[in-house]
């Protein structure tokens, strides 16, 4: 079949969604019943949908979420970890990100802090916000290496640009002098400019001690906490609960004798 010249034009203009829709309609016998306005609407709808898909794929790839499969639709509200359903569903709408506010998620190991943070990050990507996930220890290590090899300015910019920065695993080790300065600069640049999620096994009352130097601790925590939403989780490890459910059944053959 000869290539329709309109298809060539659409591809040259990089309107690939419209090109695919045009080809589908051309081969659809029922498309002859559509008027010109309906054809155009279908072409535009396909182009918009494909552009949205590409943009979401790009945002998710750049976010580098620890749990890319995490989604707010899959949150388990039945597990005994004191997750406030109304608050979490409100956060899922994303207004706090648009308002450049923060979120602090605390709780014991295995209770799902990172997963919930990534679920909110994935929803933010779907809402067309830029997102970046970093484990705090690894971020500090990358910045330290960046000082040595000249990448520090680029690494720093990458941490300050996204609409939402997820800092996972705050503590438990006390920050070094360089780490305090790095964190202060990041928080200062993002303060009232972009949102942050921080997860930690430590209660907020212990954070001042982790930062270490009182002047830095006061400055950093004041910028994080004063406009932050709070999710304080508690309960058994969800990893252990899931492992127990999935463990193989053991049969005691001695009872058969």
Image: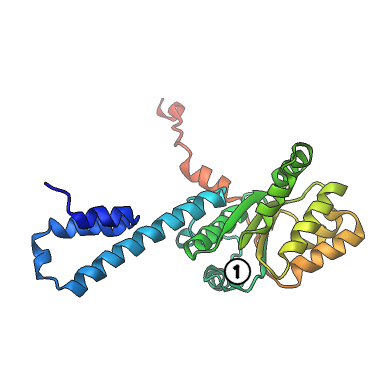
Image spot of residue 79 (x, y percent): 54, 59
Left or right relative to 7: residue 48:
right
**Residue 164 image position (x, y, % from top left):** 61, 61
Using residue 198 as the reference point, say whether residue 43 is left or right of it.
left
Q: Give the residue at x 61% y 52%.
A: 133
Q: Nearer the viewer, residue 102 or 35?
A: 35
- Vertical side of 166 occupied by 37: above or below: below
At x 60%, y 60%, the residue is: 81
Q: Position of residue 146 (x, y in %)?
A: 74, 41
Answer yes or no: is residue 88 visible: yes
Helix, strand or loop at disc 1?
helix
Please state which of residues 254 and 126 is positioned toward the viewer in this rendering: 126
**Image quarter (top left, top right, bottom left or bottom right) of the C terminus:** top left
Tell me if mark 1 has few (under 14), some (14-19) or many (20+) residues whose alpha carbon lies within 10 angstroms of its own. Answer: many
Report whether residue 107 is seen. no
Q: Residue shown at 30%/66% (left/top)?
A: 45
Please tell me which residue lies in front, 216 or 208: 216
Q: How is the image coloured?
A: rainbow
- Of residues 222 and 85, the one drawn nearer to the viewer in this rendering: 222
Residue at left offset 57%, top offset 70%: 91
What number of labels is visible?
1
**Dot 1 corresponds to which residue?**
97
């Amino acid at each position: 079949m000869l290539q329709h010249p309109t298809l060539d034009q659409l591809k040259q203009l990089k309107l690939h969604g419209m090109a695919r829709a045009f080809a589908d309609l051309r081969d659809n016998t029922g498309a002859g019943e559509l008027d010109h306005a309906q054809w155009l609407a279908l072409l535009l709808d396909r182009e918009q949908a494909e552009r949205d898909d590409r943009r979401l794929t790009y945002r998710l790839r750049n976010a580098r979420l620890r749990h890319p499969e995490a989604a707010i639709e899959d949150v388990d509200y039945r597990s005994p970890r004191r997750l406030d359903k109304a608050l979490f569903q409100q956060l899922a709408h994303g207004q706090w990100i648009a308002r450049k506010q923060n979120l602090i998620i605390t709780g014991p190991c295995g209770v799902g802090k990172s997963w919930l943070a990534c679920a909110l990050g994935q929803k933010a990507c779907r809402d067309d916000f830029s997102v970046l996930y970093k484990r705090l220890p690894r971020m500090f290590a990358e910045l330290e290496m960046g000082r040595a090899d000249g990448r520090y300015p680029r690494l720093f910019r990458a941490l300050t640009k996204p609409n939402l920065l997820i800092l996972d695993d705050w503590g438990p080790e006390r920050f070094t002098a360089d780490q305090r300065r790095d964190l202060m600069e990041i928080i200062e640049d993002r303060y009232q400019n972009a949102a942050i999620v921080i997860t930690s096994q430590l209660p907020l009352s212990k954070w001042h001690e982790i930062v270490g130097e009182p002047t830095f601790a006061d400055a950093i925590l004041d910028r994080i906490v004063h406009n932050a939403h709070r999710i304080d989780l508690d309960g058994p490890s969800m990893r252990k609960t899931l492992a127990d459910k999935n463990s193989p059944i053991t049969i005691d053959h001695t009872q058969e004798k």
